[in-house]
């Protein structure tokens, strides 16, 4: 059946290309033209892979001058465009270029080289860049989750560690979307400032941003407040707790961690401050460095109290953006080294769009409606009653 289909497709395509040449020359076969005219000049063989058909062997007509080009069979292309799109999709989903090359013979009837797969991926570059730099003026962003993630990239034949700055915006309706992906040093205040200004140049209304959630990178909080003067900052409670526990002996870590929970999961700010006072009284003498570390970050850890109660579970930590980073690492780990910044953006854009589809079912502020038991569980397990 497949052989008959390939023969039928071959006959059909060759007939169309012969008709194209007849139209292009302006006369049928064996008809003479007046003056110096171009002529048919036989055929040349060419293999072409077609989705659902496989590899077909075609006889492509040519003219004597070599000017004729069929629109049915693009020059230099060895498979139809749909196959190229499928290859790009398989690559973005996690199959490496070498693996695609290995299975292409079985699937398409011809081996697709890793270079051809990479070339097919480059066709996505324009669409990815357009999405990455899209207009944000229609998005009413209320919260910004900010962080950076490192990737190993090949830059001018050298493997470098390249950080990528990432921002997830939460709209007033609670929907999450990736608003920024930009290579830059995440420890540099100047790079973060440029990143925020780029977001605003793309239409982000800074006056609507009310909170930035971050993990306390160098100078990030200061730069954020300067670029978004109406917004507050929320330090990730998980990162702060890790910093505190790093100053605690191993035998005491579990007990200190248990004493931190009533602070971070208190039902109100006054009760959180009361829990901290009890923490300080208990540990000031034995662990002054841990107490000082927590005290320095305390106010920034409790900013979420100024926002709707239904949002607290999402605003306490950077879990939302950490989940995105986990997907980034899971996809790029098999590659070990990314071939460059553009290739990195292609992968991250695809992963970001997949995550946005997932986020549609879990908007900020709707978690407790999806999990009605959460409020009771959180109060019993993580507040002063425990």
Image (spheres, grey):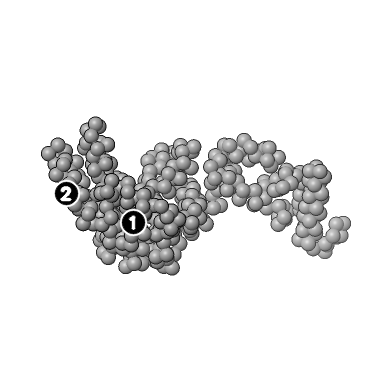
**Which residue is pictured at 78% across the width and 62% down the height?**
23
In the rendered image, the vertical position of residue 74 relative to residue 252, given as above or below: below
Q: How many numbered circles does the render carry?
A: 2
**Which residue is pictured at 16% across the width and 40% down the height?**
283
Judged from the image, the secondary structure of the residue bearing numbered disc 1 is helix
Q: Residues within 10 Å of mark 2 (few under 14, many from 20)?
A: few
| Residue highlighted by disc 2 | 277
In the image, 368: left or right of 276? right
Name the quarter where the N terminus is drawn. top right
Q: Is residue 128 visible?
A: no
User: In the rendering, which numbered label is found on residue 154?
Assistant: none
| Badge nearest the viewer, 1 or 2 | 2
Q: Residues within 10 Å of mark 1 (few under 14, many from 20)?
A: some
In the image, 102: left or right of 380? right
- Give residue 320's position: percent from left, percent from top: 39, 51
* Along the viewing direction, whichever of 165 and 249 lies nearer the viewer: 249
- Give residue 159's position: percent from left, percent from top: 41, 38
Judged from the image, the secondary structure of the residue bearing numbered disc 2 is helix
- Give residue 260's position: percent from left, percent from top: 25, 45
* Along the viewing direction, whichever of 340 and 230 lies nearer the viewer: 230
Q: Earlier in the sequence, mark 1 or mark 2?
A: 2
Check the image and name the residue furthest to the top: 251
Indicate the quadrant where residue 247 lies. top left
| Residue highlighted by disc 1 | 312
Check the image and name the residue furthest to the left: 285
Q: Is residue 278 visible?
A: yes
- Give residue 383's position: percent from left, percent from top: 28, 49
**Which residue is pictured at 78% across the width and 45% down the height?**
6
In the image, 218: left or right of 319? left
* Along the viewing direction, whichever of 76 and 216 lies nearer the viewer: 216
Indicate the quadrant where residue 19 lies. bottom right
Check the image and name the residue furthest to the right: 30
């Amino acid at each position: 059946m497949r052989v008959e289909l390939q023969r039928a497709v071959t006959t059909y395509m060759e007939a169309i290309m012969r008709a194209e040449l007849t139209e292009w020359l302006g006369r049928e076969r064996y008809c003479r033209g007046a003056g110096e005219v171009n002529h048919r000049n036989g055929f040349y063989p060419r293999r072409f892979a077609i989705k659902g058909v496989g590899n077909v062997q075609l006889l492509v007509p040519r003219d004597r001058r070599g000017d004729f080009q069929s629109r049915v069979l693009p020059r230099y292309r060895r498979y139809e465009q749909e196959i190229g799109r499928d290859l790009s999709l398989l690559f973005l989903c996690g199959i490496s270029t070498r693996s695609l090359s290995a299975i292409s013979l079985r699937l398409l009837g011809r081996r697709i080289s890793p270079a051809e797969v990479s070339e097919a991926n480059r066709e996505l570059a324009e669409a990815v860049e357009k999405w990455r730099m899209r207009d944000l003026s229609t998005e009413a962003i209320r919260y910004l989750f900010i962080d950076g993630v490192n990737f190993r990239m090949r830059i001018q034949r050298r493997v470098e560690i390249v950080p990528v700055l990432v921002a997830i915006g939460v709209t007033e309706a609670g929907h999450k979307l990736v608003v920024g992906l930009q290579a830059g040093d995440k420890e540099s205040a100047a790079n973060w400032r440029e990143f925020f200004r780029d977001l605003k140049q793309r239409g982000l209304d800074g006056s609507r941003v009310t909170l930035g959630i971050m993990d306390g990178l160098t100078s990030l909080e200061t730069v954020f407040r300067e670029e978004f003067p109406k917004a507050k900052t929320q330090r990730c409670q998980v990162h702060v707790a890790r910093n505190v526990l790093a100053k605690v002996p191993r035998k005491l870590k579990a007990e200190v961690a248990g004493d931190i929970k009533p602070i971070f999961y208190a039902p109100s700010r006054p009760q959180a401050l009361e829990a901290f006072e009890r923490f300080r009284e208990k540990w000031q003498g034995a662990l002054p460095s841990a107490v000082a570390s927590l005290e320095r970050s305390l106010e920034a850890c409790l900013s979420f109290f100024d926002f709707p109660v239904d949002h607290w579970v999402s605003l306490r930590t950077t879990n939302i953006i950490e989940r995105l980073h986990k997907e980034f690492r899971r996809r790029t780990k098999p590659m070990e080294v990314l071939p460059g910044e553009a290739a990195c953006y292609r992968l991250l854009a695809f992963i970001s769009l997949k995550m946005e589809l997932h986020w549609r079912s879990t908007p900020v502020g709707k978690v407790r409606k999806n999990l009605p038991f959460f409020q009771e569980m959180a109060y019993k397990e993580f507040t002063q009653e425990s």
